[in-house]
Image (spheres, coloured by chain):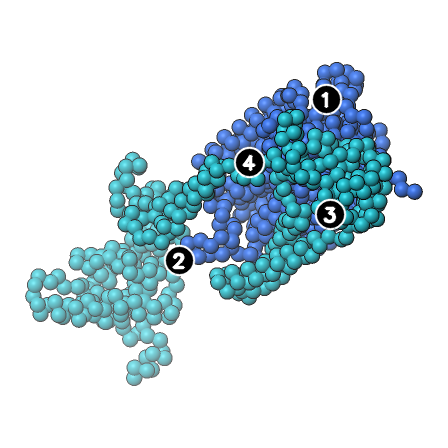
Chain colours: A blue, B cyan
Amino acid sequence: MDTRASSITNPYNGPLEGDNAFAQITHNVTRIMQAPRPPLAWYIAFAFALSLLGVFGLSLGFVVWEGIGAWGHVHPVAWGFPIVNFVFWVGIGHAGTLISAVLFLFRQNWRTAINRFAEAMTIFAVVCAAVFPGVHIGRPWLPYWMFPIPNQMQMWPQFRSPLEWDVFAVGTYATVSILFWYMGMIPDFATFRDRSTGTVRRFVYGLVAMGWRGSSRQWHRYERAYLLLAGLATPLVLSVHSVVSFDFATSQLPGWHTTIFPPYFVAGAIFGGFAMVVVLAVPAREFFGLKRIITIKHLELMAKVILATGMIVGYAYAMEMFVAWYSGAMYEQFAFLNRAFGNYAWAYWTMIFCNVVSPQVFWFKKMRTNVWVILIVGIIVNVGMWFERFVIICTSLTRDFLPANWGAFIPSPVDYATLAGSFGLFFTLFLLFCRYLPMVAMAEVKAFIPESHVHDH
Amino acid sequence: MSDSEQTSNSAAPLYGVLAEYDTPTALVKAARKVRDAGYRRWDTYTPFPIHGIEKDMGITMTKLPWFVLVMALVGMATGTLFQYWTNGIDYRWLISGKPFWSWPANIPIIFEMTILFSAFGALGGMLFLNNLPLPSHPLDLKERFRRASDDKFFLVVEASDSKFDDKETRDLLGGTAPVVLEDVLEDRITSSVVPRALMYSMVILGAASLVPFALFAQSRSAKSREGRLHVVWDMDFTPAYKAQEGNILFGDQRAMRAPPLGTIAQGHLEEDDHMFTGKVGDSYAIGLPSSITATEATMLQGKQQFGIYCAPCHGLGGEGNGMVNERASTLKQGWVPPSNLHQQYIKEQPAGQLFGTITNGIRNMPGYAAQIDPDERWAIVLYLRALQKSRAASVDELSDADRAQLK
């Protein structure tokens, strides 16, 4: 897109106020919150997201009222779309913490431009994910049975079940991600507080900033806490999708009962999560004038991560096939041949194309630096990662040991409505975040520009 | 901040002296001077963490990691002991004969609890050590201090420092080339008293929020004739029709559903007419069906069944003089006696007709289809034939061995 043309139509691409680099960064980020109204594109996107959210509410309401039979899942595919969507969204939710924590520990300072909204994306994705098992349990008014709460049944949950591990892993992940996200935002909330003019805004931002005043003694403890949280979140982020994969791997179903699942799920989660980050970053930097902060260099680096994790995922697909053959187990061999050439072969090859073939364009620098290519590949990868979960669940469940137990899964319109609707929830939350919260970690970005260096001697 | 507010605060005591700098380098240089002058109650305020300023300010390593370590251990212990107590002691799950406590399967949750507690420890410890949340601060009254979260760097030496001196401190800071050097007064504007109306409404709301929980607790312990209160009934109330009840939902208004016409239970497809009805076409079958063979075993089976079901009336020899007949005859109440099975017309009946009589009954003899399986009925027919033969056989028909035995 021609930057001059867009600077005319989009006030956010105008010149930055401030006589130094720090003030310009502050202005670049805070003008989104300070502007009387967001750009027209935000309103269009928000209207679209809200209507999808309405679809989500109505379809879930219908499922709760009518019973989960309104979804298309039948024997033997009792998991169907809800669990596909759950694993998909939890996977999306991995990139945020990975960027915040793992890249922080590896001192990849370029992360500061994107970590904040990647973390926001993580939390919103986990919210979307949590809805599905919550409704899929069949009686959505009883999810507290999954938690160790004393009750009149005098029962405790079975802590040795992978499904219970899931409750703890996803619950801990959501909590720690929110803590991490919130703590990262405290200094930026202080900036928002100090720069907002309205009484309500000053009060609300002041409340959440908790009286942060940027004292160096406070920064010292703050940075230590951030480092510790990053250190804690790193094994956590690896554990979450490993535990999700245990839901499958500890069962005895051919195609699920494999030891490669935990690393393969984690790599896939990072892959899909980064793809979602670029899908959100490209329009966000365009419409909110953040191109000086989220540069094409950042997008290129993310494209490289997508390429690398895409190769890991491709390796995992190949290794699954190899192990099935090498195992000599009849059912295992059938399960994987059936995946590639059986009743859901179309879904398998869609997955291969999206996840293994499409990222290969990122070998070329021209492609890595073209926002349109990055955006389109990001979308394709997300489609592919959704199909990966669909393939894992549907091929294994519809063709297990006994042909008498075989079946077919045909999604119902309500399935499609809840899937589309979950994107409505995700985008609604994300657009609200863009408008009202600091989309870029200003303090962190400031700390890594050349002007921040202390010239000592 | 309006001028009137500023003046109303002008009588307040001094909080400290504020110096403003444009660059981190200038701030760091000033910080070293203040550190070396031996001040203790002072701080710098920056929009981002300046790396290495800890040394320039003489800040020692925070105790925060110890907080986190303690919380991690507490989380780990909680995860372990809670799972051990719930699944190993309080509510034991017996799964495939596995031990009640098999710790490897409890590791994922112990791990998650460790991380969860430590994360709360990291954030909570940071807030606690930083004395946050802190609603008001004397520096908030400085309009220019708002840029501490934007692009300016500040250094404040507090008046409460034992080394603080009105002139010396100002000279020290003035020598660090600040952009601005100003006094900061204590905050006498922001009231530290919470408004009474707010207090009361908080107390009332707090008390009101306990009401639902009190009601829950009350209804959990109280006895009631009404049954439990349910928002969603789940399967607590699942009325079912009883077998012989009416049911207006069906056309025939019966709760029981009749199987469709021609329904056959598994293993009861009785295709062979000879075997199951004793008839071939419209006439009685002459011999045994193909699945029954006349062996000694079949004969003995027939003898046993005859003894059980036939002999009470017909007698062990089949002459119609069983115990039931003997007793009934003495009572003389219109008893129709059982037939003597050695009569000529019975001897001439085809095997299929005898089978039919056992199956369906005759005169006041009931049908035995419900009690005797078809193959056993055929065995009885076979035994009866042998019995009839035994009464009218000639010596010539015996084998040589049997004839020798007779002599």
Vertical comparison of B67 with B316: above or below: above
Q: Which of marks 1 and 4 is nearer the N terminus?
A: 1
Q: How far apart are marks 2 and 3 (CA)?
A: 118 Å
Say whether mark 4 and mark 1 are on the same chain.
yes
**Foreground: disc 1 or disc 3:** 3
Proximity of marks 2 and 1: CB atoms separated by less than 8 Å: no
Say whether mark 4 and mark 2 are on the same chain.
no
Say whether mark 3 and mark 4 are on the same chain.
no
Q: How far apart are marks 2 and 1 (CA)?
A: 97 Å
What x and y, as percent, mark residue B62?
73, 52
Name the residue rendered at 38%, 61% in the picture: B292
Q: Earlier in the sequence, mark 2 or mark 3?
A: 3
Name the residue rendered at 82%, 48% in the picture: B37
Q: Please, what secondary structure does the residue beneath circle 1 have?
A: helix
Chain letter of the residue beneath label 1 in the structure image:
A
Residue matched to label 1: A12
Q: In which quarter of the image is residue B327?
A: bottom left
Q: Which of A293 and A221 is in front in this view?
A: A221
What x and y, as percent, mark residue A219?
73, 44
Which circle marks residue B290 in the picture?
A: 2
Say whether mark 3 and mark 2 are on the same chain.
yes
